Amino acid sequence: MAFLSSVRSVAFALLVLSASFGTLSVAHAQGEKAHAVHEQAATKAASAQAEQPQTTSTDEFVAPSLNIAQQQKPVIDDLKKQAKTLEAQLEKAAASDEALANLKIQLDSLSKRLLDAGVTFRPRLAEINSRLDQLGPAPADNQPPEPIAIAEERARLLAEKAEINAIIGETESTSVAVSQLASQVSNLRRELFTKTLSQRVSIDAALGPDVVAVASAQMQSLWRVVQSWWRFVIAFKLNSFLAAAFFALATALVIQFGARRLLGAIYERDPAIERPTYLSRLLVAFWSTVIPSAAVAAFLATTYLLLNYFNVLRTDIASLLQSLFFVLGLVYFIHRLAWATISPDMPAWKLVPVAPRSGRILAWLITATSLTTGLDSFFGTVNRILSSPLSLTVAKSLLATVMVGVFILLIAFLKPIQRNQDDAVRPWPHAFKVFLIFLGLAPIITGVSGYIGLARFISQQIVVTGAFLVTMYLGFLTGRAIGGEQAFASSKIGKTLHARFHFDATTLDQFGLLAGILINLVVAMIGIPLVLMQLGFQWAELTTAFYRLMTGFQIGSISISLMGLLTGLCLFAVGYLLTRWFQNWLDNSVMARGRVDAGVRNSIRTVVGYVGLCLAMLVGISAAGFNLSNLALIAGGLSLGIGFGLQNIVQNFVSGLILLAERPFKVGDWVETGGVSGVVKKISVRATEVETFQKQSIIVPNSSLINGNVGNWTHRNKLGRIEITIQAAYTPEPRRLHALLLDIARGHPAVLKNPEPSVVLKDMTGSQLVFDMLAHVADITSTSSIKNELRFQIIERFNEEGFSLTTALTKLVLSPSELDKQAELQHEGHQHVKAKVREAKAATEPKDDDE
């Protein structure tokens, strides 16, 4: 039954991911086992071939003693036998959709194995055809006969080729039959689904007076079945029953209290908070629904599994208990969902604008709707076990569907909307109210019309699928809210991470985005299969589809494997992190202790980083399933691109490698190139970052550093020479001035004694003497303070010794006519200024009253 499948999915909702990966593991193990068996058979065949006497021939082509047709014949016969067995099971499975789904999966697997068996012959056929082409056709009657060895070899090859073609024909015929059988199964499933929904039954017998008596007799029969089983438990299996209940309760308590301790404030509503944020309300609603429901589901599932393991359950009791547990889990889940969303007892935590009193009624109506649907499923199991008459089954389903419709109509005519506490209570929005009325009338009308299967299907979609969709919607809203800007940083978890690990706001925001993506992914992986199962898909189909999706599917000639892609991404991430760790360890623990120069450390660190990144990329690409040999095509395309538009990029890249290898300069050197002067901060494979003394970062392409002239002040060491130009006034004692300057240079502690400082008379005029002071210092990168101190000492010593500084003078020579013209212009300017002053005074003087 689809309903039981849906409820089973609720009980194991949180185990879907692990079950899916478990299926992958089992399938992978089965594939490995089959592969091992195949290899063992091949090994035995090879051994048998080796034991047989070997014959030598002048021909290069030697046929195996046991050809591939004889090796594959038992395998293909076994596949044909399996096909006949599945064909015989079709008639028995025609009445059950779940059995048909399992049969369809087996047929698809068998079809794939038949296809693989046919492909196995291709290499041998290619060898035979190639050898036959070498031998050529048999000579005609009028031609000389060919050697006997060649004729025998041609006959043997033709016989083997005919045998292989015959087996391939049988394989293809079996494959076609299996494909037709799979199509027949698909048609039967569609017909069964259509028949279930479109079959119309007479409800006259269901409304007769005998139905009540039959129902009472069925309840008495059910009581006797349960009572007899319980007596058996009390007499023989009480300890097993109590142990199963104890372990199931312990499992539920671990989930409940573990989640309470781990989640804390985002699990329980705090009545002290008057205005909780939207994110807090979403988190509380989502987790307060999922965790208790998971605890109840774990208790019920563990109880059932342990009771079944301890042989406490009979076959009929197992079916009844399974159906009852599924109904209880589903009803509890929907009740928790409604209560968490509406929150009638704590209106501040509600997610929908519903008044408290109306919200309480709405929550109980939703619970009653789910309980009615669940009881309909449970009593359907009872009717099947007790072989109830058709009239009772129809009456039960009709009553359940009508009650579901009535409950939905009551919800539609409820007046729950209240935006604020002071606002009046209003009904639902008109469009939503009409939609609810339609949902309520649909099961009632279809049930009364006699379409009981369609009515049950509609009520099931309304209750169960609606609950799943609402939960998924809450999960997606939670993921979007957590992924919002600064939302995670303002949460309690974000504040804890900030206080303990000192993460900044940007890092916490990235964590929130990652958490939102993971929540959306988990909600989709759990919710989508549950919704699909409500629409008629079976669990075996979903797991098979998920396995194919993860292990590989074809798009044209391209095979894509999500598991391979995820594995490749994970390996690349691991390789990247290992590379970064090795870089830090090598730099900080090895080279730093060895007193390696900072530039050498940077070069080694950069090279190690690029090598590790390339290796991680190669490993990730290989794990993702891409053939590295196909990269030759990409390399060919890149070569064309390099020839046209990527020359500069490749040139810079190669230049960067040369700079890292030759090291004409390193990080921390003071360089000058192309009008740029500054300190090297970073050398990468494309460009070098140079920081000027004004703290401006300039990105210089590596090719310009290789092809152009580069001056490096600190190439071998930091020793350098400073120059200070002094313009002194003319003095008749230039040698005393020279000695004074030389004494000033020698007296500074930062000036090196070797090489010795010097003073050079650079130029002289009638009014000044120009000297250059030359001095060597140990660190050319910090000369500003030295020059500054030397200049101060020069001024002070000049004042003490009676010397003075001067600047170059510019002489202006004018002729007498030009001097007269300048004087006239100055006089005219003075007269113009005086006239303007008189006009301003006249404008500001007050006028007489008579005027």
Image (cartoon, rainbow, N blue to C red):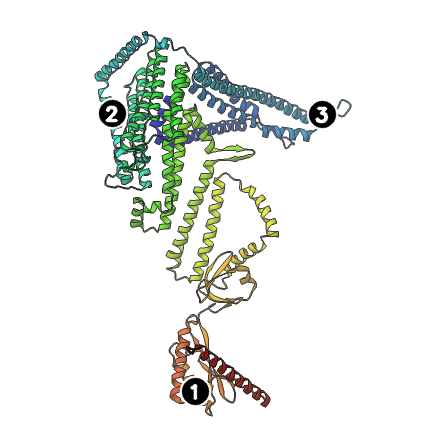
Mark seen at residue 804: 1
Q: Work out whether mark 1 precedes mark 3 in sequence or the reverse, and give the earlier one.
A: 3
Q: Work out whether mark 2 precedes mark 3 in sequence or the reverse, and give the earlier one.
A: 3
Question: x and y percent of residue 139 in the render?
Answer: 73, 25
The residue type indicated by label 3 comes to: Ala
The residue beneath circle 2 is: 245
- In this orientation, does residue 727 appear? yes
Q: Residue at x 68, y 27 (%)?
A: 150
Task: Report the Cα–Cα distance between label 2 and label 3.
Answer: 82 Å
Question: x and y percent of residue 147 in the render?
Answer: 70, 27
Task: Determine whether the residue tagged by mark 3 lies in a helix, strand or loop.
Answer: loop
The residue beneath circle 3 is: 138
For the residues labelled 2 and 3, say whether their Cβ atoms are less than 8 Å apart: no
Q: How many marks?
A: 3
Which mark is in front, 2 or 3? 2
The residue type indicated by label 2 comes to: Ala
133 left or right of 671 in image:
right
61 left or right of 315 in image:
right
For the residues labelled 1 and 2, say whether their Cβ atoms are less than 8 Å apart: no
Task: Determine whether the residue tagged by mark 1 lies in a helix, strand or loop.
Answer: loop
Q: Residue at x 75, y 23 (%)?
A: 140
Q: Residues within 10 Å of mark 2 (few under 14, many from 20)?
A: some
Q: Does residue 565 sit above or below 580 in this rendering?
A: above
The residue type indicated by label 1 comes to: Ser
